[in-house]
Amino acid sequence: MANTKSAIKRIRRISKQTAVNKARKSRFRNALKKMNLLIDGKKKDEAIKFLPKLNSELMKIAKTGIIKKQNASRNVSRITKKIAAI
């Protein structure tokens, strides 16, 4: 257990940041699930409309370091290919 004042403050700060990161990651996963449902349902028009929102969500969390930038780019690339294949 932390026994200095600064360590106690860091624990408090880390727990707050962990909650924020979990919320952001959850939004990212939900967006991916929604996009996959659109693709599985062969709803190309809706998927194309949702793509910029998904891209924005991915880049936001890549910028903050929750996922790596290459991971976000790879996800966008794969989803774009799937949409084109519909």
Image (cartoon, helix red, strand yellow):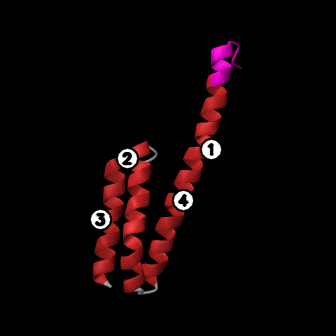
Q: What separation in Å lies between label 4 and label 2 (alpha carbons)?
A: 16 Å
Circle nearer the N terminus (4, 3):
4
Check disc 1 and report the residue beneath it: 19
**Rendered image: mark on residue 27:** 4
Crowding at label 1, few (<14), some or many (≥20) Cα neighbours within 10 Å? few
Label 2's element? loop
Crowding at label 4, few (<14), some or many (≥20) Cα neighbours within 10 Å? some
Q: Mark 4 is on which residue type?
A: Arg
Give residue 72's position: percent from left, percent from top. Answer: 36, 55
Give residue 20's position: percent from left, percent from top. Answer: 58, 45
- Contact between labelled residues 2 and 4, with CB atoms less than 8 Å apart: no
Circle nearer the N terminus (4, 2):
4
- Residue 50 is one of the magenta-drawn residues: no
Quarter of the N terminus within the rendering: top right
Quarter of the image for residue 36 reads: bottom left
Q: Is residue 36 above or below residue 61?
A: below
Check disc 3 and report the residue beneath it: 77
The magenta region covers: 1-9
Q: Mark 1 is on which residue type?
A: Ala
Circle nearer the N terminus (2, 3):
2
Label 3's element? helix
Q: What separation in Å lies between label 2 and label 3 (alpha carbons)?
A: 14 Å
Check disc 2 and report the residue beneath it: 68
Q: Residue at x 31, y 72 (%)?
A: 80
